[in-house]
């Protein structure tokens, strides 16, 4: 992390900054890794927890792209919904198995595996955070902005208009993004 001032920002401030700044996104990823992993462990069954966690991180990217600070909604609430919806969508599309529902009253800070050592839990969270930060760092500034807008639901034409570039430039960037992310996740 190059900018320690980002650590003191609220989630709402980071969400606004993260749309154009990958370092702010790194901070959000670090903050939301525990929640994403917990939700993935609650919903796993028809879909592996690691796959659901990946969907959760994509939900976080989508939350950054779609967050509107003018609505006076906490980013953590909005992101939680985006993360959950992305995971549930993955479960629904994976099979015709009924959607599992975890006990949402459990504390986010509880650990499912009682035999796991605290050090290994912290290490696992850090590994996930580093993994997602590394994936995002592979993108150029333009690719990052396009990725965030796309994850927020914008189509190619809307992205081109928003960034003032051609539709073909958006398409080319999306192809590069997919290649980079595919390579990174292997």
Image (tube, rainbow, N blue to C red):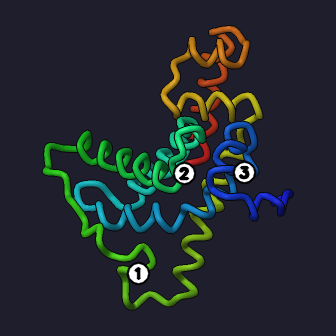
Lower position in the chain sequence, tag 2 or tag 1: 2
Q: Residue furthest right?
A: 2
Measure the alpha-carbon separation of dots 2 and 1: 24 Å
Check disc 3 and report the residue beneath it.
24
Which SS class for mark 3? helix
Measure the alpha-carbon separation of dots 3 and 1: 27 Å
Measure the alpha-carbon separation of dots 3 and 2: 14 Å
Above or below for 65 versus 167: below
Check disc 1 and report the residue beneath it.
111
x and y, in percent, of residue 129 in the image = 61, 62
Q: Residues within 10 Å of mark 3 (few under 14, many from 20)?
A: many
Check disc 2 and report the residue beneath it.
75
Residue located at (53% from left, 88% from top): 118
Residue 142 placement, left or right of 49: right
Residue located at (23% from left, 55% from top): 46
Residue located at (60% from left, 64% from top): 31
Which of these two is toward me, 71 or 6?
71
Q: Tell me the mark number nearer the camera, choosing from 3 and 1.
A: 3
Which SS class for mark 2? helix
């Amino acid at each position: 992390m190059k900018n320690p001032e980002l650590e003191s920002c609220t989630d709402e401030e980071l969400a606004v900054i993260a749309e154009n700044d990958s370092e702010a996104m790194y901070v959000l990823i670090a903050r939301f890794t525990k929640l994403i992993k917990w939700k993935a462990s609650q919903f796993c069954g028809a879909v592996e927890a690691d796959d659901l966690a990946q969907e959760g991180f994509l939900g976080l990217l989508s939350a950054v792209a779609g967050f509107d600070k003018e609505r006076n909604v906490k980013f953590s609430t909005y992101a939680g919904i985006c993360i959950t919806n992305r995971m549930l969508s993955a479960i629904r599309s994976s099979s015709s198995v009924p959607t599992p529902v975890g006990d949402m009253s459990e504390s986010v800070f509880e650990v499912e595996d009682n035999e796991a050592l605290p050090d290994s839990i912290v290490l696992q969270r850090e590994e996930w955070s580093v993994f997602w930060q590394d994936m995002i760092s592979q993108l150029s500034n333009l690719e990052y902005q396009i990725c965030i807008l796309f994850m927020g639901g914008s189509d190619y034409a809307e992205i081109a208009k928003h960034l003032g570039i051609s539709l073909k430039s958006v398409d080319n960037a999306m192809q590069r993004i997919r290649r980079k992310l595919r390579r990174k996740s292997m």
